[in-house]
Image: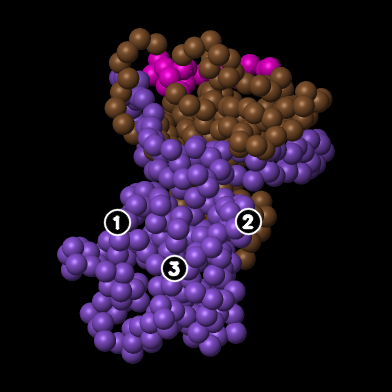
Chain colours: A brown, B purple
Amino acid sequence: MTLVSLACALPNLSMTHNDLSDRYGILDNEDYIMMENQDHPALNSVVGDGPSWKSYNRWLCFPADSMTLDCRDHESDQSWNLIDPEERDGMGFYAVMDVSHEGLYYRFESPGWFSYENCHQQIDEIQELLDGQKGICVFAADIPSEEDLNGAEEGNSSAWVFYGIKSLAGKSMAPIYEAVELYHGPL
Amino acid sequence: MAQRKKKSCKSPKKQRQRHGPPHPWRLCPLGQHYRKAHSQSAYTRSDGTLVSGSRHHATCVDNRSGLDQIYPEELIAIAERYFLTLSGPPKADSLGFDKGNDFDAYIRGWTRYWNEVLGEKDPLDPDLVKALIATESGFNPKARPPGKNPRRARGLMQITSKTREILKDESGELRDFLVNVDDNELDDPNLNIAAGIRWLFRKKEIARSKIGSATGWRDAVAEFKDYDDDPQNPQMHKFDEYYKRLKK
């Protein structure tokens, strides 16, 4: 990983200055290597639409009890439990993890949206990783806000897209990080 | 995140990489999808804390599957940017329907897009799509078959919920070039046609697996309509009539 790409992998949100490193012994060498081996950003700007930026995944770890889970409609951002069950069937939902930690608020959402059933399947899977745990680590890339990009005063919330989650109970990664063969070269 | 591991592997993994350039109309690199600019509203938590809101620029988001996936936001952006300047078939013949020519730009644009993306040697003819829409819905974007089943077919190309699920299934029969739309979005002519044409290409593959290399687009239409066992069905005759008229 070059210095330039490493710099891009670092959070561009000064808001995230608090310690989100793994204090729970969840992450292993493979997890850090995966983070450092990212060959392209998980998120980037659209050409011709505002300033150019890119965002790589990084691991952020939180107390497990700081996280709540939800499925939210991709259009209205409404929580699934506020939507008429008969209407839910054909709708698309983001799996969302909200974290409130040391006065800061993090919203992690899935890279794409799913049917209600698939979203709940994902949420259930994450819940299993949370149950009975002290800590949880999320592999996610931050979506810079216009305020971040303009250097304006930051708020107390940030938005992220997540590609993986891990606790001492197990690990669940997006298929893109489960696929293909292993990298054995120098780091 | 479909797969779950209890134990971690011993070696680091390398990400799946997509190769080749994306279609020139696409707004994001291959393997990513477009998400339009959006705002998050400020809100007050139950403990009285104010959580700040924020506004985000449009974003290219890595697909979780590593496959090519296209979402409504990008389908809409592509149609707005490119379709009004295209020319060529389908023929401007309403086929006797009030709205018969209203969706020609979408038919023209998405036929071209999928022909180029999927690289079919025998390209799909936009006139064939128009004739198919005439028989499926009579160009009524809100068309529904009778009954109350919420999963019944919808819109111009009469796409069912089951089909919609196949079109976006990351581990399903499409294998790549997925289209993510929800049921309500199938009432949108642009999204319905984009998804419907992708499905027609898949139906041609299915027809080819049954018929072999002689498979033509009419066979794909018969498969689309579920008349593959009955190619002389009156609905197919109607389709043939419309298609002939458009080719005159």
The magenta stretch spans which residues?
A17-38
Q: Residues within 10 Å of mark 3 (few under 14, many from 20)?
A: many
Q: Is mark 2 on a helix, strand or loop?
A: helix
Circle 1 is placed at which residue position?
B121
Query: Can residue A35 be found in the magenta stretch?
Result: yes
N-terminal label among 2 and 3: 2
| Residue B167 in view of the camera | no
Residue at (35% x, 61% y) in the render: B123
Please name whichever residue, B191 or B147, is drawn nearer the observer in this view of the structure.
B191
N-terminal label among 2 and 1: 2
Residue at (48% x, 26% y) in the render: A40
Q: Residue A20 has which mark?
A: none
Dividing the image into 4 quarters, which one contains the C terminus of chain B?
A: bottom left
Q: Residue B80 has which mark?
A: 2
Residue at (43% x, 19% y) in the render: A37
Q: Mark 2 lies on which chain?
A: B
Q: How crowded is mark 1: few (under 14 residues within 10 Å), some or many (20 or more)?
A: few
x and y percentages locating residue B173 in the rendered image: 31, 55
Please name whichever residue, B60 or B111, is drawn nearer the observer in this view of the structure.
B111
Query: Can residue A52 be found in the magenta stretch?
Result: no
Left-right relation of A130 to B215: right
Circle 3 is placed at which residue position?
B126
Residue at (50% x, 84% y) in the render: B95
Q: Quadrant of residue A158 in the image?
A: top right
Q: Is mark 1 on a helix, strand or loop?
A: loop
Q: Which amino acid does label 2 sit on?
A: Glu
